[in-house]
Every structure is written in structure tokens, then in C-alpha cells.
Image (cartoon, grey):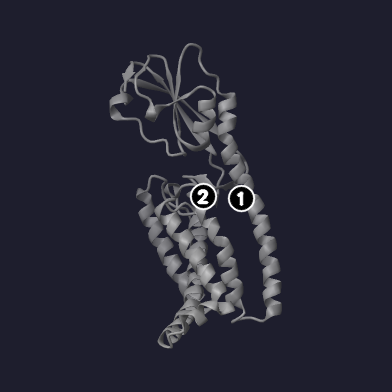
Amino acid sequence: MNFFLLFFVISAIVAGGLYYVSADFLSGKYPLSQLTFFTLFLSSGMFILFLIFDNYSKLLKEFAVYVKKKNILKFLVKKKNTDRIFLAIWFIGVFIFNFTFAGGSARYETLLLPPFVFFFLNISRNYVSLNKIKYFLTITIIFTLILSFLVTFSIFQYASSYKKFSDTFVFPNNKKVYIMGHEGFKYYMEKKGAIFFQEFEGRINEGDIIIRATLPSPGKIDNEYISKIDYLTDITLNSNYPIRVYNTDAHAAFYNYGAGFLPYSFSRSPIETFEIFRVRESIVK
């Protein structure tokens, strides 16, 4: 418990630093509520990692003994060791995958939940009785299920926002629509006949429309094109549901860490904002 308090203090200090430096972030400064979430997430993660590494340091010492005895195979086939080695490979493999190929997105961290749960249950036996573990596990499962449903609904809202926009947006007659943004926005709009702006090569004619979704990695409009287009309006999709999983105002970055340092957060900011432009002067790409 003393170590948890230590990690909590460290996390609070980091959160304090984040409060000041985040003023220069594109997503803006973190409010107190989001910093509280950040502190809880960071301190809890540091604490469980400490317990895991402490547990595996004992395993490594045991492994060193078997190496000296030149009996590594006996170490590997021991039941308690095979389980821990398998979980370690799982954890390290997912960690490397996420921070090399997947870019560190929180959604891929969910692949670490099973080994974390097994690690935690295995380690808990060293600190509390079996009855207390069962009681704690029951509460944890109930709380996790409730939280999962709440967060999942927010994921559904965000993902369906692009289909909702594509179904309601009226494509102009005899004019083309170009889009900036990936994920579901690109998928649904291309099905309706829109053209992906970044990959298009050719002439974009006067009167054509450019739509930029602000969240799914839309990229910026090049300076050479800005003088040739007119901003028309923003279309925002709102919801009173207070949980956000991908939102720069909420600093929630379940899909992309560029939006912030929280996997989910509380906010009533728009689910998504679409910027609409009209081409005033033909663009050649």
C-alpha cells in the first residue's frame, strides 16, 4: 500500500506538470476532472506493473539458479513457471506490437487485459486470503461489466456518427464532394460517391465541395489550396451522453493517442465536427 501511495504522489506531480505544459497542446489544457482521471489511471498502472516486475524478479532469480545447475528444461516444465512464462510472452508481445506497429493506441491495450487479470490474481494470493480475493473479484467483475457497457455505448455513438452524417448529407447536383479523414468517415462517404482528397490527382473544379472531419486523422489543407477555397460552415453532431472515447476536448484517445492521454473521459463536447468548404478557384493536384 505504501508503494501505491508513492505512485499516486508521483502521478499527481506528473499531472501537475501536464496541467501547465498542456496549454501548448493542440487539444488544449487539461481541466482538474481530467487530471484526476489521469492520476488514477497512471498510479494504478504503475502499481500493477511494479507488482508484476517484483514477482518476475523472483522468477528470474529462480531461473538463474537452474542455469547454474545446467537444468533449464526442468525450470521451464514446472507448472507454475510455464503459466508465468506464457503470460510474460503474451504481455511483452502485445506491448511491442502496440508501440511499434500499432502506434500506441489505447484500443490495442485491451489485448493486455487478460494477462493483467491473470497476473493480478496470481500475485494477489501473496497478499490477501482466498476469500478476500473472491469478494474483490466479484466486485471488480461487476464494476468492469458496468463500465464496459457505458464505454461501449460511447464507442457506438462515435462510430455511428459517420454513417449518420453520410446518410443525412445532401450531395450537390453536378458537383463532386471531396473528403478529408479516415476510418468510418472515409468508408461511408466513399460508398456515397465522395472522393478521398489526399489521394486524388487531377483537377478539382469550381463549386466542388470539400468536407473535413476533424477527428479521424484528416490532415491539413495545404497553404497553396487555402486561398482557392471558401469556408462555408461547420456541421456538429452532439449528444447529451457524457462519456467520450475519442475527443480532443475531452482528451480521450481510445482510437488515437493524438487526442490526449486518457482512454475515455467525461464531456458533453460534440461527438464530431465536419468542416465544409466550397472550391472558389479550380485546384490542380
Residue type of the residue flagged with mark 1:
Val
Residue type of the residue flagged with mark 2:
Phe
Residue in view at x 43 percent, y 59 percent: 96
Q: Position of residue 156 (x, y in %)?
A: 61, 42
Residue in view at x 68 percent, y 63 percent: 141
Q: Which mark is residue 151?
A: 1
Residue in view at x 52 percent, y 32 percent: 187
Q: Position of residue 181 (x, y in %)?
A: 45, 34
Residue in view at x 50 percent, y 27 percent: 190
- Near mark 1 (Cα within 10 A), the count class, few <14, some 14-19 or many ≥20, is some
Of residues 104 and 96, the one nearer the viewer is 96
Of residues 143 and 20, the one nearer the viewer is 143
Whether the residues at callouts 1 and 2 have beta carbons within 8 Å, the answer is yes
- Helix, strand or loop at mark 1: helix
Query: Which image quadrant: the N terminus?
Result: bottom right
The image quadrant of residue 165 is top right
Q: Position of residue 281 (x, y in %)?
A: 33, 15
Q: Which mark is residue 254?
A: 2
Question: Spatial distance from mark 1 to mark 2, Cα to Cα?
Answer: 10 Å
Of residues 125 and 35, the one nearer the viewer is 125
Residue 203 drawn above or below residue 71: above
The answer to whether residue 238 is seen in the rendering is: no
